[in-house]
Image: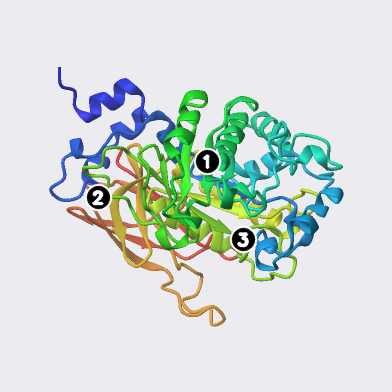
Amino acid sequence: MHLSRREMMLQTGAVSLGALASPWLGSWQPVGADEDDVPIQSPRVARFERMGFGMFLHWGLYSQIGRGEWAKHFQKLPTDEYMQLMKTFTAKDFSGRALARLAKSAGMRYITLTSRHHDGFSLYDTRGLSPYDVTHTPAERDLIEDFTTGCREEGIVPMLYCTTLDWTDPRFESDWEGYQKYLRASLELLCTEYGPIGGFWFDGNWSKPNADWQTDRLYGLIRKHQPEAMIINNTGIQKGGQVGHPEIDSVTFERGRPQPIDRRGHPKYVAGEMCHTMNFHWGLATRDFNYLSPAHVIEELCSCRRAGANLLMNMGPTAEGAAPPYERAALERVGDWIEIMGGSNSAITAGRPAGIDGEERDFGLAVGDDVHLFVYDLTRTADTQAHGASRGAGPRKFTGLARPVKRATWLDNGEELKLEQSGDALTLHATKYPYGTNTVVRVARLTTG
Protein backbone atom coordinates (compact mmCIF):
# COMPACT_ATOMS: atom_id res chain seq x y z
CA MET A 1 0.00 0.00 0.00
CA HIS A 2 1.34 3.43 -0.93
CA LEU A 3 0.88 6.12 1.72
CA SER A 4 1.04 9.80 0.95
CA ARG A 5 3.68 11.86 2.70
CA ARG A 6 0.95 13.41 4.87
CA GLU A 7 -0.39 9.98 5.93
CA MET A 8 3.11 8.74 6.70
CA MET A 9 3.80 11.79 8.86
CA LEU A 10 0.61 11.19 10.83
CA GLN A 11 1.48 7.54 11.42
CA THR A 12 5.09 8.19 12.44
CA GLY A 13 4.34 11.23 14.60
CA ALA A 14 7.01 13.15 12.74
CA VAL A 15 5.17 16.47 13.08
CA SER A 16 2.28 17.74 15.16
CA LEU A 17 -1.30 17.33 14.02
CA GLY A 18 -1.66 21.10 14.28
CA ALA A 19 1.05 21.62 11.71
CA LEU A 20 -0.48 19.09 9.33
CA ALA A 21 -3.93 20.59 9.68
CA SER A 22 -2.80 24.06 8.73
CA PRO A 23 -4.46 25.27 5.51
CA TRP A 24 -1.48 27.55 4.96
CA LEU A 25 1.09 24.82 4.56
CA GLY A 26 -0.45 23.68 1.32
CA SER A 27 0.53 26.98 -0.23
CA TRP A 28 4.14 27.20 0.89
CA GLN A 29 5.52 24.63 -1.53
CA PRO A 30 7.58 26.13 -4.37
CA VAL A 31 5.82 26.43 -7.69
CA GLY A 32 5.72 23.08 -9.45
CA ALA A 33 6.75 21.12 -6.34
CA ASP A 34 5.01 17.97 -5.16
CA GLU A 35 4.85 17.32 -1.40
CA ASP A 36 6.22 13.82 -2.01
CA ASP A 37 9.45 15.44 -3.27
CA VAL A 38 10.18 16.68 0.28
CA PRO A 39 11.53 14.08 2.74
CA ILE A 40 9.75 13.38 6.01
CA GLN A 41 10.96 14.91 9.25
CA SER A 42 12.23 12.39 11.75
CA PRO A 43 10.74 12.86 15.24
CA ARG A 44 14.07 14.10 16.64
CA VAL A 45 14.41 16.74 13.91
CA ALA A 46 10.79 17.84 14.41
CA ARG A 47 11.44 18.25 18.15
CA PHE A 48 14.62 20.20 17.46
CA GLU A 49 12.89 22.62 15.08
CA ARG A 50 10.11 23.21 17.60
CA MET A 51 12.66 24.25 20.24
CA GLY A 52 13.64 27.23 18.08
CA PHE A 53 15.98 29.06 20.45
CA GLY A 54 18.95 27.70 22.38
CA MET A 55 21.90 28.82 24.47
CA PHE A 56 25.51 28.13 23.49
CA LEU A 57 28.12 28.07 26.28
CA HIS A 58 31.86 28.26 25.58
CA TRP A 59 33.63 27.71 28.88
CA GLY A 60 36.95 26.21 29.89
CA LEU A 61 40.49 27.04 31.01
CA TYR A 62 40.62 29.94 28.55
CA SER A 63 37.89 31.68 30.55
CA GLN A 64 40.46 32.44 33.25
CA ILE A 65 42.60 34.33 30.73
CA GLY A 66 39.61 36.37 29.55
CA ARG A 67 40.91 36.82 26.01
CA GLY A 68 38.63 34.48 24.09
CA GLU A 69 38.51 30.74 23.52
CA TRP A 70 41.35 30.76 20.95
CA ALA A 71 43.84 32.48 23.29
CA LYS A 72 46.19 29.49 23.44
CA HIS A 73 46.42 29.29 19.67
CA PHE A 74 46.67 32.95 18.75
CA GLN A 75 49.01 33.88 21.58
CA LYS A 76 51.11 30.75 21.03
CA LEU A 77 50.95 29.65 24.66
CA PRO A 78 52.97 26.44 25.23
CA THR A 79 50.84 23.56 26.45
CA ASP A 80 52.78 23.12 29.70
CA GLU A 81 52.29 26.79 30.51
CA TYR A 82 48.65 26.86 29.45
CA MET A 83 47.72 23.78 31.46
CA GLN A 84 48.94 25.48 34.64
CA LEU A 85 45.50 27.11 34.51
CA MET A 86 44.12 23.78 35.72
CA LYS A 87 45.55 24.60 39.19
CA THR A 88 43.19 27.57 39.54
CA PHE A 89 40.12 26.16 37.81
CA THR A 90 37.63 26.09 40.70
CA ALA A 91 34.26 26.23 38.89
CA LYS A 92 32.95 27.59 42.18
CA ASP A 93 30.10 29.50 40.51
CA PHE A 94 29.19 26.89 37.91
CA SER A 95 25.69 25.49 38.23
CA GLY A 96 23.99 23.67 35.41
CA ARG A 97 20.64 24.33 37.02
CA ALA A 98 21.27 28.07 37.40
CA LEU A 99 22.28 28.30 33.73
CA ALA A 100 19.20 26.30 32.76
CA ARG A 101 17.03 28.74 34.72
CA LEU A 102 18.60 31.62 32.81
CA ALA A 103 17.96 29.84 29.51
CA LYS A 104 14.35 29.27 30.49
CA SER A 105 13.88 32.93 31.46
CA ALA A 106 15.28 33.88 28.03
CA GLY A 107 12.69 31.72 26.25
CA MET A 108 15.32 29.15 25.25
CA ARG A 109 14.58 25.43 25.14
CA TYR A 110 18.05 23.86 25.01
CA ILE A 111 21.69 24.50 25.93
CA THR A 112 24.81 23.33 24.09
CA LEU A 113 27.90 23.29 26.35
CA THR A 114 31.54 22.77 25.33
CA SER A 115 32.39 19.39 26.86
CA ARG A 116 35.89 19.93 25.46
CA HIS A 117 37.19 22.71 23.24
CA HIS A 118 40.20 22.85 20.91
CA ASP A 119 42.59 23.39 23.86
CA GLY A 120 42.08 19.75 24.85
CA PHE A 121 40.68 20.36 28.36
CA SER A 122 37.55 18.35 29.23
CA LEU A 123 34.80 19.37 31.63
CA TYR A 124 34.14 15.71 32.48
CA ASP A 125 35.97 12.73 33.92
CA THR A 126 37.74 11.19 30.93
CA ARG A 127 38.49 8.00 32.91
CA GLY A 128 42.18 8.25 32.12
CA LEU A 129 41.81 9.03 28.42
CA SER A 130 43.47 12.42 28.97
CA PRO A 131 45.43 14.09 31.78
CA TYR A 132 43.65 17.34 30.97
CA ASP A 133 40.24 17.04 32.59
CA VAL A 134 38.28 18.61 35.42
CA THR A 135 39.05 15.83 37.91
CA HIS A 136 42.64 17.13 38.06
CA THR A 137 41.54 20.63 39.11
CA PRO A 138 40.34 22.17 42.39
CA ALA A 139 36.78 21.81 41.08
CA GLU A 140 37.00 18.04 41.73
CA ARG A 141 33.62 17.32 40.20
CA ASP A 142 32.27 16.21 36.87
CA LEU A 143 30.77 19.37 35.40
CA ILE A 144 28.98 17.61 32.55
CA GLU A 145 27.11 15.61 35.18
CA ASP A 146 26.18 18.85 36.94
CA PHE A 147 25.16 20.42 33.64
CA THR A 148 22.99 17.60 32.30
CA THR A 149 21.27 17.03 35.64
CA GLY A 150 20.61 20.75 36.11
CA CYS A 151 19.14 21.11 32.63
CA ARG A 152 16.71 18.24 33.14
CA GLU A 153 15.59 19.62 36.49
CA GLU A 154 14.51 22.81 34.70
CA GLY A 155 13.03 21.15 31.62
CA ILE A 156 15.85 22.31 29.36
CA VAL A 157 17.35 19.88 26.83
CA PRO A 158 21.12 19.36 27.35
CA MET A 159 23.34 19.15 24.27
CA LEU A 160 27.10 18.73 24.11
CA TYR A 161 29.70 20.44 21.93
CA CYS A 162 32.52 18.04 21.04
CA THR A 163 35.72 19.30 19.44
CA THR A 164 37.40 17.17 16.81
CA LEU A 165 40.40 19.54 16.59
CA ASP A 166 42.95 19.31 19.42
CA TRP A 167 45.92 21.66 19.89
CA THR A 168 47.44 19.68 22.77
CA ASP A 169 47.15 16.00 21.88
CA PRO A 170 50.27 15.00 19.88
CA ARG A 171 48.31 12.20 18.18
CA PHE A 172 46.38 14.85 16.24
CA GLU A 173 49.52 15.39 14.12
CA SER A 174 51.50 12.15 14.52
CA ASP A 175 49.07 9.26 15.13
CA TRP A 176 45.81 9.82 13.27
CA GLU A 177 44.41 6.34 13.92
CA GLY A 178 45.21 6.64 17.62
CA TYR A 179 43.62 10.07 17.75
CA GLN A 180 40.42 8.81 16.12
CA LYS A 181 40.21 6.03 18.70
CA TYR A 182 40.56 8.67 21.42
CA LEU A 183 37.73 10.73 19.93
CA ARG A 184 35.45 7.70 19.80
CA ALA A 185 36.30 6.61 23.34
CA SER A 186 35.60 10.14 24.58
CA LEU A 187 32.29 10.27 22.73
CA GLU A 188 31.26 6.87 24.08
CA LEU A 189 31.69 8.18 27.62
CA LEU A 190 29.46 11.16 26.83
CA CYS A 191 26.89 8.85 25.25
CA THR A 192 26.73 6.37 28.12
CA GLU A 193 27.42 8.21 31.40
CA TYR A 194 25.06 11.19 31.42
CA GLY A 195 21.59 10.00 30.48
CA PRO A 196 19.66 11.19 27.42
CA ILE A 197 21.48 13.91 25.46
CA GLY A 198 19.53 16.09 23.04
CA GLY A 199 22.35 16.38 20.52
CA PHE A 200 26.07 16.30 19.81
CA TRP A 201 27.57 19.37 18.15
CA PHE A 202 30.94 18.60 16.51
CA ASP A 203 33.43 21.27 15.52
CA GLY A 204 36.87 21.05 13.94
CA ASN A 205 36.69 18.84 10.84
CA TRP A 206 37.28 22.00 8.83
CA SER A 207 40.85 22.07 10.24
CA LYS A 208 41.79 19.06 8.06
CA PRO A 209 39.26 19.04 5.24
CA ASN A 210 40.97 16.22 3.34
CA ALA A 211 41.51 13.89 6.31
CA ASP A 212 39.58 10.69 6.98
CA TRP A 213 37.63 11.65 10.11
CA GLN A 214 36.02 8.18 10.27
CA THR A 215 32.64 9.77 10.82
CA ASP A 216 30.73 6.56 10.05
CA ARG A 217 32.19 5.02 13.19
CA LEU A 218 31.91 8.20 15.24
CA TYR A 219 28.27 8.86 14.40
CA GLY A 220 27.53 5.14 14.71
CA LEU A 221 28.25 5.39 18.43
CA ILE A 222 25.57 8.05 18.76
CA ARG A 223 23.02 6.04 16.84
CA LYS A 224 23.85 3.01 19.02
CA HIS A 225 23.70 4.70 22.43
CA GLN A 226 21.67 7.88 21.83
CA PRO A 227 19.43 7.19 18.82
CA GLU A 228 17.20 10.22 19.51
CA ALA A 229 20.10 12.69 19.70
CA MET A 230 20.67 15.28 16.99
CA ILE A 231 23.97 14.99 15.09
CA ILE A 232 25.38 18.37 14.05
CA ASN A 233 28.84 19.09 12.64
CA ASN A 234 29.80 22.72 12.19
CA THR A 235 30.93 23.41 8.62
CA GLY A 236 32.44 26.78 9.56
CA ILE A 237 31.85 30.40 8.65
CA GLN A 238 32.50 30.07 4.92
CA LYS A 239 30.39 26.95 4.34
CA GLY A 240 27.09 27.69 6.04
CA GLY A 241 24.27 25.37 5.05
CA GLN A 242 26.40 22.51 3.70
CA VAL A 243 25.01 19.09 4.65
CA GLY A 244 27.98 16.72 4.53
CA HIS A 245 27.59 13.23 6.03
CA PRO A 246 24.17 11.51 5.58
CA GLU A 247 23.74 11.12 9.36
CA ILE A 248 23.79 14.89 9.89
CA ASP A 249 20.45 16.11 11.28
CA SER A 250 21.00 19.88 11.01
CA VAL A 251 23.17 22.14 8.92
CA THR A 252 24.95 25.07 10.56
CA PHE A 253 25.22 28.76 9.80
CA GLU A 254 28.03 30.20 11.91
CA ARG A 255 27.34 33.90 12.41
CA GLY A 256 25.52 33.99 9.08
CA ARG A 257 21.81 34.42 8.61
CA PRO A 258 20.30 31.18 7.34
CA GLN A 259 18.52 30.82 4.08
CA PRO A 260 15.45 28.60 3.63
CA ILE A 261 16.48 25.06 2.73
CA ASP A 262 15.08 23.66 -0.50
CA ARG A 263 14.58 20.04 0.56
CA ARG A 264 12.98 18.81 -2.66
CA GLY A 265 14.60 15.62 -3.84
CA HIS A 266 16.87 15.30 -0.80
CA PRO A 267 17.21 11.82 0.73
CA LYS A 268 16.70 13.19 4.25
CA TYR A 269 15.03 16.15 5.96
CA VAL A 270 17.67 18.23 7.75
CA ALA A 271 17.06 21.20 10.03
CA GLY A 272 19.03 24.45 10.13
CA GLU A 273 20.69 26.28 13.00
CA MET A 274 22.52 29.60 13.18
CA CYS A 275 25.10 29.92 15.95
CA HIS A 276 25.85 33.48 16.96
CA THR A 277 27.66 35.12 19.85
CA MET A 278 27.01 38.14 22.03
CA ASN A 279 30.27 39.84 21.05
CA PHE A 280 33.16 38.93 18.73
CA HIS A 281 34.39 36.02 20.85
CA TRP A 282 32.84 32.76 21.99
CA GLY A 283 34.69 32.41 25.29
CA LEU A 284 34.93 35.19 27.88
CA ALA A 285 36.79 38.23 26.49
CA THR A 286 36.94 40.98 29.10
CA ARG A 287 38.18 43.64 26.67
CA ASP A 288 35.61 42.96 23.98
CA PHE A 289 33.01 45.72 24.41
CA ASN A 290 31.22 45.13 21.11
CA TYR A 291 28.11 43.44 22.49
CA LEU A 292 24.84 42.76 20.73
CA SER A 293 21.81 44.51 22.12
CA PRO A 294 18.60 42.67 23.10
CA ALA A 295 17.03 44.27 20.02
CA HIS A 296 19.73 42.77 17.78
CA VAL A 297 19.18 39.31 19.27
CA ILE A 298 15.42 39.62 18.75
CA GLU A 299 15.94 40.52 15.09
CA GLU A 300 18.37 37.61 14.58
CA LEU A 301 15.93 35.20 16.21
CA CYS A 302 13.11 36.36 13.94
CA SER A 303 15.35 36.12 10.86
CA CYS A 304 16.20 32.54 11.77
CA ARG A 305 12.61 31.55 12.30
CA ARG A 306 11.67 33.10 8.96
CA ALA A 307 14.00 30.52 7.37
CA GLY A 308 12.71 27.73 9.62
CA ALA A 309 16.04 27.60 11.45
CA ASN A 310 16.96 27.69 15.13
CA LEU A 311 19.11 30.37 16.76
CA LEU A 312 21.86 29.11 19.08
CA MET A 313 22.91 32.22 21.03
CA ASN A 314 26.30 32.06 22.73
CA MET A 315 27.76 33.60 25.83
CA GLY A 316 31.08 32.95 27.58
CA PRO A 317 30.68 32.35 31.33
CA THR A 318 33.13 33.88 33.80
CA ALA A 319 36.32 32.15 34.95
CA GLU A 320 34.33 30.62 37.82
CA GLY A 321 31.41 29.57 35.62
CA ALA A 322 28.72 32.20 36.21
CA ALA A 323 26.71 34.02 33.57
CA PRO A 324 28.25 37.50 33.03
CA PRO A 325 25.97 40.38 34.10
CA TYR A 326 25.47 41.98 30.68
CA GLU A 327 24.67 38.75 28.86
CA ARG A 328 22.32 37.68 31.65
CA ALA A 329 20.41 40.96 31.51
CA ALA A 330 20.28 41.05 27.70
CA LEU A 331 19.01 37.48 27.36
CA GLU A 332 16.42 37.94 30.07
CA ARG A 333 15.17 40.98 28.17
CA VAL A 334 14.83 38.84 25.02
CA GLY A 335 12.82 36.42 27.16
CA ASP A 336 10.51 39.28 28.16
CA TRP A 337 9.87 39.96 24.45
CA ILE A 338 9.15 36.29 23.77
CA GLU A 339 6.69 36.23 26.67
CA ILE A 340 4.86 39.29 25.30
CA MET A 341 4.64 37.60 21.91
CA GLY A 342 3.03 34.46 23.33
CA GLY A 343 5.75 32.64 25.24
CA SER A 344 8.15 29.88 24.25
CA ASN A 345 5.35 27.81 22.66
CA SER A 346 4.20 30.67 20.43
CA ALA A 347 4.92 31.49 16.80
CA ILE A 348 8.59 31.93 17.74
CA THR A 349 8.92 28.16 18.10
CA ALA A 350 5.70 26.70 16.70
CA GLY A 351 5.57 28.87 13.58
CA ARG A 352 6.52 27.34 10.26
CA PRO A 353 7.62 29.02 7.00
CA ALA A 354 4.62 29.11 4.72
CA GLY A 355 5.70 31.20 1.74
CA ILE A 356 4.20 34.37 3.24
CA ASP A 357 6.40 37.32 2.35
CA GLY A 358 6.18 40.99 3.15
CA GLU A 359 8.05 44.05 2.02
CA GLU A 360 11.70 44.37 3.02
CA ARG A 361 12.17 42.26 6.18
CA ASP A 362 8.49 41.63 6.99
CA PHE A 363 7.27 38.03 6.78
CA GLY A 364 4.65 35.57 8.03
CA LEU A 365 4.69 32.17 9.73
CA ALA A 366 1.91 29.60 9.86
CA VAL A 367 0.79 28.44 13.31
CA GLY A 368 -1.92 25.82 12.95
CA ASP A 369 -4.87 27.51 11.24
CA ASP A 370 -3.56 30.98 11.92
CA VAL A 371 -0.77 33.15 10.56
CA HIS A 372 1.51 35.48 12.49
CA LEU A 373 2.93 38.48 10.64
CA PHE A 374 6.29 39.85 11.78
CA VAL A 375 6.54 43.60 11.22
CA TYR A 376 9.91 45.39 11.34
CA ASP A 377 10.94 49.05 11.47
CA LEU A 378 7.81 50.26 13.21
CA THR A 379 8.50 53.13 15.59
CA ARG A 380 6.28 55.78 17.08
CA THR A 381 7.80 58.37 14.73
CA ALA A 382 8.90 57.84 11.15
CA ASP A 383 12.38 59.22 11.80
CA THR A 384 14.15 58.59 15.11
CA GLN A 385 17.12 60.73 13.95
CA ALA A 386 19.73 58.92 16.06
CA HIS A 387 18.89 55.58 14.50
CA GLY A 388 18.05 56.65 10.98
CA ALA A 389 14.84 56.52 9.01
CA SER A 390 12.13 54.00 9.73
CA ARG A 391 9.16 52.93 7.66
CA GLY A 392 6.89 53.73 10.60
CA ALA A 393 3.17 53.05 10.80
CA GLY A 394 1.04 52.50 7.73
CA PRO A 395 0.13 49.83 5.19
CA ARG A 396 2.31 46.71 5.04
CA LYS A 397 1.78 44.40 2.09
CA PHE A 398 2.09 40.60 2.23
CA THR A 399 1.65 37.84 -0.35
CA GLY A 400 1.16 34.08 -0.14
CA LEU A 401 -1.98 33.98 2.00
CA ALA A 402 -4.17 31.29 0.48
CA ARG A 403 -7.31 31.69 2.65
CA PRO A 404 -9.53 34.66 3.56
CA VAL A 405 -8.49 36.42 6.75
CA LYS A 406 -11.20 37.77 9.04
CA ARG A 407 -9.27 39.44 11.84
CA ALA A 408 -5.83 40.77 12.75
CA THR A 409 -4.63 41.81 16.21
CA TRP A 410 -1.31 42.87 17.71
CA LEU A 411 -0.05 40.27 20.15
CA ASP A 412 1.41 42.87 22.50
CA ASN A 413 -1.84 44.71 23.31
CA GLY A 414 -4.71 42.99 21.47
CA GLU A 415 -5.47 46.01 19.27
CA GLU A 416 -7.49 45.04 16.19
CA LEU A 417 -6.06 46.17 12.86
CA LYS A 418 -7.62 47.10 9.53
CA LEU A 419 -7.14 44.57 6.73
CA GLU A 420 -7.53 44.55 2.95
CA GLN A 421 -7.26 41.30 1.02
CA SER A 422 -7.34 40.43 -2.66
CA GLY A 423 -6.55 36.88 -3.68
CA ASP A 424 -3.37 35.80 -1.94
CA ALA A 425 -2.31 39.42 -1.27
CA LEU A 426 -3.05 41.18 1.98
CA THR A 427 -2.46 44.69 3.28
CA LEU A 428 -2.12 45.11 7.03
CA HIS A 429 -2.61 48.66 8.27
CA ALA A 430 0.04 48.71 10.99
CA THR A 431 -0.60 51.22 13.76
CA LYS A 432 1.98 53.08 15.83
CA TYR A 433 3.34 51.79 19.07
CA PRO A 434 1.60 53.16 22.14
CA TYR A 435 3.77 55.70 23.92
CA GLY A 436 6.41 53.94 26.00
CA THR A 437 6.42 50.78 23.86
CA ASN A 438 8.82 49.48 21.23
CA THR A 439 9.07 45.73 20.74
CA VAL A 440 11.61 45.95 17.87
CA VAL A 441 9.68 43.39 15.82
CA ARG A 442 5.93 43.59 16.29
CA VAL A 443 3.76 40.54 15.66
CA ALA A 444 0.16 40.47 14.44
CA ARG A 445 -2.02 37.38 14.62
CA LEU A 446 -4.34 36.68 11.69
CA THR A 447 -7.37 34.47 12.20
CA THR A 448 -9.72 32.89 9.70
CA GLY A 449 -12.70 32.23 11.94
Circles 2 and 1, Cβ within 8 Å, touching? The answer is no
Kind of residue at disc 1: Glu
Q: CA distance from mark 3 to mark 1?
A: 37 Å
Q: What secondary structure is found at the residue carrying circle 3?
A: loop
Kind of residue at disc 2: Leu
Residue position marked by numbered label 3 in the rendering: 278
Q: Which mark is residue 177?
A: 1
Position of residue 21 measured from the top left corner of the image (x, y, whole percent): 29, 32
The relative height of residue 292 versus residue 260 in the rendered view (above or below) is below
The relative height of residue 267 versus residue 325 in the rendered view (above or below) is above
Q: Residue at x 50, y 30 (%)?
A: 222
Q: CA distance from mark 2 to mark 1?
A: 55 Å
Q: Is residue 413 visible?
A: no
Position of 353 with respect to 227 (left or right) is left
Which numbered disc, 3 or 1, marks the residue that appears first in the sequence? 1
Residues 377 and 298: in front is: 298
Residue position marked by numbered label 2 in the rendering: 401
Which numbered disc, 3 or 2, marks the residue that appears first in the sequence? 3
Q: Is residue 118 visible?
A: yes
Position of 392 with respect to 188 (left or right) is left
Q: Which mark is residue 244?
A: none
Q: What secondary structure is found at the residue carrying circle 2?
A: loop
Position of residue 53 measured from the top left corner of the image (x, y, whole percent): 52, 46
Report crowding for label 2: few under 14, some 14 to 19, many 20 or more residues within 10 A (C-alpha): many
Circles 3 and 1, Cβ within 8 Å, touching? The answer is no
Kind of residue at disc 3: Met
